[in-house]
Image: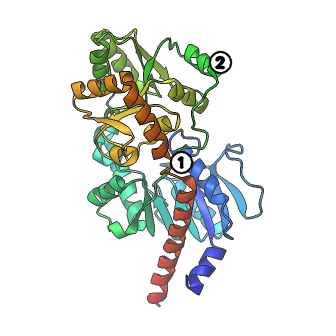
Amino acid sequence: MDIRAELLRNFMKIAFDLRRIGNPGIGRYMKCLVEQILKQENGHQYLLILPTGARDPLAWPDTPNISLCFAKSPYYSVREQFEIPQILRHHRVDLLHSPHFLLPLWCPCPAVATIHDVIYIACCQDLPSAIGRRYYRTMIGASARLSARIITDSIFSKSEIVRYLHIDPEKIAVVYPAVAADFERMSDAHALQAVLSRHRIERDYILYTGIGKARKNHGLLLRAFRQFHSGSNAAQLVIAGPLDDGERPLKQLAAELGIEKQVVFTGFIPDSDLRALYSSARVYACPSLYEGFGFTILEAMACGTPVVCSNTSSLPEVAGDAALYADPRDCESFSEALYEAFTNCGLREALIERGYDNVRRFSWEEAANRSLGIFDEALGRTLGQAISCT
């Protein structure tokens, strides 16, 4: 490393835009990544931009190189385009990292954006508002162009960013995320039974966790479960997660298929209950048509649950040889895979062991180290361009 790069590493002040840290998906990514970065001994100063009203959302180390700032402006607002740059100037920040794709259009310092996926471009039906789709495309495109470097979660997502946003692939770095440290198999029978009873789960079950979006393919799962259930398999299907307006049509479909008494819709699940649901499930099913990474399949594997998942998008990249794959557009294919994972004891044991091994491929410590290196590159590249222009 040359002298300038060494100075950059020792004296960089990095800001993290963590205004969505309360979100169950992106918030978990922010929490795990930033916690791990703050553990590194590297001489950096850190500014954590949090939402107003946040009360100690992380167990921040009590060290002088970490400061907190509470922003009033919400995501996707006009106000944030003025407030965030003002915060960055006031605190003399050298580099901004947005763990969600949104960047200020007039950022006073170099920036790194994490673009997890381009789902709302590739799967436009997931964002029904035409105005929302236009805003998303405009802002994600602007962030991709304005950022010094882009971090994304998978090789698949990198290819999609290149495809849809026309970004130089050399600008994009793949940094695999991981599962939270507390996602591991639960063995406390009393605690497990309490969670199952609370959610009316009375026998062996297939679990799926996912929000109510078309690409999540809940309808296919219900039909596959109907076919699975018709083979006299005494089981329940547990669909966990906030479905919002999508819950009513799915309940109606379950009734039409005659399986409404075997299907449990839990709604939003806190992490404490989610770990129990993973640990007790006979099979975890992920019939999604499109995923930029696929956190839930790793969470299920970490909890010792066999996984059946789609053979599309990033899922084979993430699940490796530790899942049983099926065509998410073929009900019979998915039903057969569920049957095998549910009933074949030898296969189940193999999938569980491979799952544990697969989870170890992903590390937040490695993600933190890779991200810090990318921050150095981003600031170094920006300064190098400025020097070359003088």
SS state under label 2: helix
Residue that appears at 53% across and 34% down: 303
Residue 29: which disc? 1
Q: Amino acid at mark 1?
A: Tyr
Q: Give the vertical position of 177 relative to 297 (above or below).
A: below
Residue 190: which disc? 2
- For disc 1, the neighbor class at 10 Å (few under 14, some 14 to 19, many from 20) is many
Q: Is residue 128 visible?
A: no
Q: Nearer the viewer, mark 2 or mark 1?
A: 2
**Residue 384 drawn at (x, y percent):** 48, 83
- For disc 2, the neighbor class at 10 Å (few under 14, some 14 to 19, many from 20) is few
Snapshot colouring: rainbow
Q: Give the vertical position of 25 relative to 200 (above or below).
A: below
Residue 313 in the figure: left or right of residue 139: left
Q: Give the vertical position of 247 relative to 131 (above or below).
A: above
* Quarter of the figure with residue 243: top left
Residue that appears at 56% across and 85% down: 2
Q: Amino acid at mark 2?
A: His
* Quarter of the figure with residue 286: top left
Q: Is residue 335 visible?
A: yes
